Every structure is written in C-alpha cells, then in structure tokens.
C-alpha cells in the first residue's frame, strides 16, 4: 500500500549564512583591503600610466589588424586621450577616432614637473611625445601623439621607427610614465616627483 506524504512530513532546511560565516568573510575582506590600499596609495599617476599603456596596446593592435597607421592622440590641456586610425577611404583621407576620449583621474595632468631625466634606456632627453599633425601635416597645438605603422611599430612622422616616444603624468607628488621601445614594447614607470626621479618599472 502506497503511503502519501504531506508537506508536514517533509523535513525543511533554512538557507543562509551563519553569523560566524559572515564574520569570517568580513575578516578576509578586511585583510585583503589592508594589503591592497598601501599598494594603491601613492601610485595615482601609475594608475593613469596603466590606462595609457592599455590605450597604446589598443592602438598597436588596431594598426596591425587594419593594415594602416594608428596613433594615440593626447590632448595635453584637455587631460584626455583616444585612439585614431588613418582612413584612406574617408573623403578626404583623414584620421578617424575609434573610441571616445578617456580623461585622466581627478588631479592628474600630463606633465613631468621639475624632472630632468627620463627612465633609463628610453629617451635621450625627457619630454612628451611629439605634437600631433592634422591630415595636411600641420601641427595641432597642445597635443602629443604616438604613431604606429601598419605592423604596430612606433614611428616618427617620416615613418622611421623610433624609441623616443613617451607620455608623462603627475599628481603633484609622483610621476608616472609610459615609454615605447623601437620594437613597440610598452613599459610603465613610476617615481617620486623630483629633479632626478628614481624611476621604477611597474
């Protein structure tokens, strides 16, 4: 004979976390936060440098995948950057933005303050990347551009490979830098603000 059970016969369990489990989770989160905060504080410029590094990697990739020149276009006064591709199909041919502008973090600016020396084995003299040129090769005031050929190699305005490109940001206490080798290797640097900064690779 089949016996039918009712809901009263079925054991029930309650889902949820105990107070002890919540305390353990909060303790672990607190430890992780205590480890992360000292690493993040004092590296504001380094955070923006990493954003610039990612943007340069995107520009390199877009140049190679689209078989055309690309560049990271930086508005120094506007504190922003975006990637552009050279469009041969535009009428007339021109630079075309592939993404919207990305602003620096609050308080950050493009600059290197009193620093007189670049990171080792990069530029001969410290300085932002060369000024951007419009489609007619006229300089655009207040800008800096890092240009890539169709193979993703950093080049100057004549198409010659270069390792003299860099971008610098500062929050007034620290410096961040992004440099490129002639082969297109992007390196992120950080240093305390000063006349002879002690650059450290990040």
Image: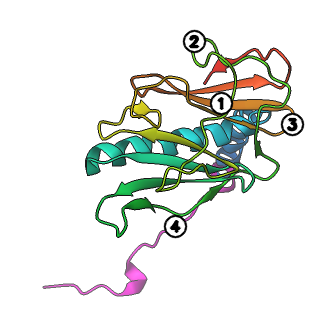
Label 1 or label 2, whichever comes before in sequence order: 2
| Residue at 39% across, 41% down | 60
Q: Depth check: give the residue in front, 119 or 42.
A: 119
In this picture, is 101 found above or below 145? below
Question: Dots 1 and 2: beta carbons under 8 Å?
Answer: no
Q: Residues within 10 Å of mark 4 (few under 14, many from 20)?
A: few
Horizontally, residue 52 falls left or right of residue 160, namely right
Q: Quadrant of residue 185?
A: top left
Q: Residues within 10 Å of mark 2 (few under 14, many from 20)?
A: few
| Residue at 52% across, 69% down | 14
Residue 121 - label:
2
Residue 34 visible somewhere in the drawing:
yes
Residue 64: in magenta span:
no
Residue 15 - label:
4
Label 2 or label 4, whichever comes before in sequence order: 4
Q: Which residue is mark 3?
A: 172
4 or 3: mark nearer the eye = 3
Q: Depth check: give the residue in front, 159 or 101.
A: 159
Give the magenta range. 1-21
Label 4 or label 1, whichever comes before in sequence order: 4
Residue 17: x and y in percent read: 59, 59
Label 3 or label 2, whichever comes before in sequence order: 2
Regarding mark 3 in the picture, which secondary structure is present there? loop
Residue 150 - label:
none
| Residue at 82% across, 49% down | 107
Give me the C-alpha separation between circle 2 and circle 4: 60 Å
Regarding mark 1 in the picture, which secondary structure is present there? strand
Q: Which residue is mark 1?
A: 177
């Amino acid at each position: 004979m089949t016996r039918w059970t009712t809901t009263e016969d079925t054991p029930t369990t309650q889902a949820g976390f105990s107070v002890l489990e919540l305390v353990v989770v909060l303790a672990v989160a607190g430890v992780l936060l205590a480890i992360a905060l000292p690493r993040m504080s004092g590296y504001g410029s380094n955070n923006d440098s990493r954003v610039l590094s990612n943007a340069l990697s995107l520009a390199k990739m877009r140049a190679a995948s689209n078989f055309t020149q690309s560049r990271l276009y930086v508005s120094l006064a506007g504190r922003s950057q975006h990637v552009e591709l050279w469009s041969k199909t535009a009428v007339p041919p021109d630079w075309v933005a592939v993404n919207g502008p990305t602003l620096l973090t609050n308080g950050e600016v493009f600059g290197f303050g009193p620093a007189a020396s670049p990171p080792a084995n990069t530029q001969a003299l410290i300085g932002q990347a060369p000024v951007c040129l419009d489609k007619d090769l006229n300089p655009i005031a207040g800008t800096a551009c890092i240009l890539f050929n169709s193979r993703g190699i950093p080049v100057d305005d004549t198409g010659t490979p270069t390792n003299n490109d860099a971008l610098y940001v500062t929050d007034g206490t620290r410096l961040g830098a992004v440099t490129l080798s002639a082969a297109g290797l992007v390196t992120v640097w950080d240093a305390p603000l000063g006349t002879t900064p002690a650059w450290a690779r990040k």
